[in-house]
Amino acid sequence: MLTRVAPSHVRFGSFEVFYYRNQFEQIKTLADYVIAHHYAELSSTENPYRALLVEVIERTAKLIAQWQSVGFAHGVMNSDNMSILGLTIDYGPFGFMEAYDPAYICNHSDHEGRYAFDRQAEIGLFNVSCLAQALLPLFDEDPNKGAEWAKQALSEYQGHYVHHYAGLMRAKLGLNNVEVEDQKLIEDLLALMATDRVDFTILFRRLCDFSTIARGGAHPPGLRDLFMQHDAFDHWAYQYKVRLLKEAGVDEVRQRRMRQVNPKYILRNYLAEQAIRKAENDKDYSEIDILFRLLQNPFAEHGEFDTYADHPPEWASQISVSCSS
């Protein structure tokens, strides 16, 4: 038996259904419940409902920044699949991106690419806008004033997203301090990865071994070979080394820190497929047990299971996941 668990299954759509039925008292009842059980600290604010929206806007922006930082794609990001607590729930088909592709679509049923990887932040804003609309009756007796306030609150979303995403990506590169060149350093790496279709998870995990004191510009084993454009990567690696040296840190300390935020293991589709086949066809649940163990702590080495962190086999590219899977 597979059971979904979460602190709450209230989602944006839970409020929308009452809004579109003009059941405004029920909106207030549900909002009061959510605040009392999950946001008790907001109950003493001047307008707890406004405070609730502000909190959910930032949690949602942070959640999607976290998805982007590990290459996670939610398959069906409609507003009814967005948690009021800023959690990942009800994602239907999902996928951890392998070969880096900003336009990656994990759901075979998403023919238009509405929920493509590079559109997740945009869709997140659309969804919190839907929530804001549903909560409008609680913001102000004057609908126009309530709408104006909601618009101002929503304008903070992009700033929250950029802030959290930039911090997460700096952490993936082992950077403690904020420098003006960081954004370009990140963007240049992602551009190279997209051009050469470099595996997202493998790249960042191997980057954990990058050394600022290696002789002759040597790179960790297997890092440079992930790229077809060796010269372009060498140029980026030099800029990265210069940036790391500005931190005046110790390589070993930085490397340990990077391994705590760059997972070695992710739930690749082909790993899940293998586990399902064994369980269904052979009543062999050993693969499920292995994946459960690895994914409980995906940052650890688990050396005896290194093959689970390798590039996917060729047949894995034929796997497609949809809402009916």
Image: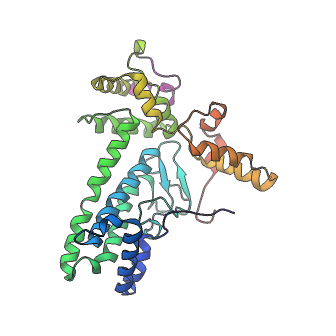
The image quadrant of residue 92 is bottom right
Q: Which residues are magenta?
A: 218-232
Front one among 24 and 158:
24
Disc count in the image?
A: 0
Quick one: which residue is furthest to the top in this view?
215
The residue lying furthest to the right in this view is: 282
Residue 15 in the image: above or below residue 325:
below
**Does the segment drawn in magenta span residue 75?**
no
Estimate the x, y position of residue 3 in percent, counting from the top left.
62, 63
> For this view, does 154 lie left or right of residue 111?
left
Q: Is residue 245 left or right of residue 282?
A: left
Examine the rendered structure and indicate whether residue 139 appears above or below residue 207.
below
Q: Residue at x 23, y 75 (%)?
A: 147
Q: Is residue 28 visible?
A: yes
Give the residue drawn at x 35%, y 23%: 238
Q: Position of residue 182 (x, y in %)?
A: 29, 36
Q: Quadrant of the N terminus?
A: bottom right
| Residue 77 located left or right of residue 243 | right
Does residue 262 appear to the left or right of 133 in the view shown? Answer: right
Image position, residue 173 (x, y; %): 38, 34
